[in-house]
Image (cartoon, rainbow, N blue to C red):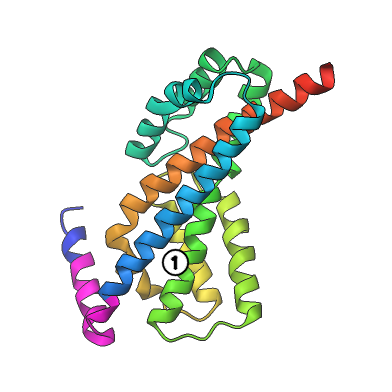
């Protein structure tokens, strides 16, 4: 663990020496693109909440604020699962049978942010290594990103391992991961937060549909 930062620095130095210093400028665009994607997904979830949540939207934000902060700091949907259940059942008044089914399920397969990140990272590294992506390559990236994220462990850094599989599938050197490894932790925190938000919104939506059917 002590040597890991030096190893990552060495890998980045070698790649920058081979590809040019301008690749670091592209990193800023890459980070901004991922964060923008996370924000857009979050806004979509908030739009769903506006329609399906019975209480006030400001109250909803207050109830989930600490949960999202914990998800951001831990980068793990599984680590905050007990807190997610507590918030959903006790603060948002979701039925236990709905919450206890959807929250564990969502922590396992609801990796929307991870899937989006893998697609963006693959396209970014393809441009860095001058790999031309055909339409079939894009379809492969989308399919693999979604499929791989469904089985992605809810632990920090798991997305990097799955990303290497996607890169190899379209002919991009997996060594390119060293370029994005330095900023991956921050991006992992952002996408975990939106994944947990998706779990909460799914519970609210299912209860909304259930209540509509009951009436």
Please tell me which residue lies in front, 55 or 156. Answer: 55
Q: Position of residue 86 (x, y in %)?
A: 50, 18
- The residues colored magenta run 8-23
**Which residue occupies 31% across, 69% down?**
27
> In the rendered image of this protein, does residue 207 appear above or below residue 133?
above
From the viewer's perspective, tell me whether residue 147 is left or right of residue 67. right
Q: Is residue 41 shown in magenta?
A: no
In this rendering, the answer to whether 26 lies above or below 79 is below
Q: Quadrant of the C terminus?
A: top right
| Label 1: which secondary element | helix
Please state which of residues 183 and 38 is positioned toward the viewer in this rendering. 38
- The picture quadrant where one finds residue 139 is bottom right
Residue sitting at 40 percent across and 83 percent down?
Answer: 129
Q: Position of residue 122 (x, y in %)?
A: 47, 70
Taking depth in this image into account, of 28 and 70 the one nearest to the observer is 28
Looking at the picture, does residue 167 appear above or below residue 4? below
Give how far across and how far down residue 56 sits, in percent.
Answer: 54, 20
Q: Is residue 12 in the magenta section? A: yes
Q: How many marks?
A: 1
Residue drawn at x 24%, y 72% is 12
The residue indicated by pointer 1 is: 121
User: In the picture provided, is 28 more to the left or to the right than 121?
Assistant: left
How packed mark 1 is, by other alpha carbons closer than 10 Å (few <14, some 14-19, many 20 or more), is: many
Q: Residue at x 41, y 73 (%)?
A: 174
């Amino acid at each position: 663990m002590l040597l890991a930062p030096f190893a990552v620095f060495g890998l980045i130095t070698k790649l920058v020496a081979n590809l040019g210093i301008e690749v670091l400028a592209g990193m800023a665009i890459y980070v901004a693109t991922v964060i923008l994607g996370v924000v857009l997904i979050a806004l979509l979830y908030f739009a769903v909440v506006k329609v399906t949540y019975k209480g006030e939207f400001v109250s909803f934000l207050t109830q989930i604020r600490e949960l999202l902060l914990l998800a951001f700091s831990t980068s793990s949907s599984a680590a905050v699962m007990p807190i997610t259940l507590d918030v959903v059942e006790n603060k948002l008044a979701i039925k236990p049978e709905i919450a206890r089914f959807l929250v564990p399920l969502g922590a396992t397969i609801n990796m929307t942010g991870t899937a989006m990140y893998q697609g963006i990272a693959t396209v970014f590294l393809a441009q860095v290594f001058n790999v031309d992506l055909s339409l079939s390559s894009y379809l492969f990236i989308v399919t693999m990103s979604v499929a791989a994220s469904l089985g992605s462990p809810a632990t920090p850094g798991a997305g990097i391992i799955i990303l290497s599989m996607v890169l190899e599938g379209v002919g991009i050197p997996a060594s390119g991961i060293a370029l994005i490894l330095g900023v991956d932790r921050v991006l992992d925190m952002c996408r975990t937060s939106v994944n947990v938000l998706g779990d909460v919104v799914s519970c609210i939506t299912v209860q909304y549909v259930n209540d509509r059917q009951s009436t």
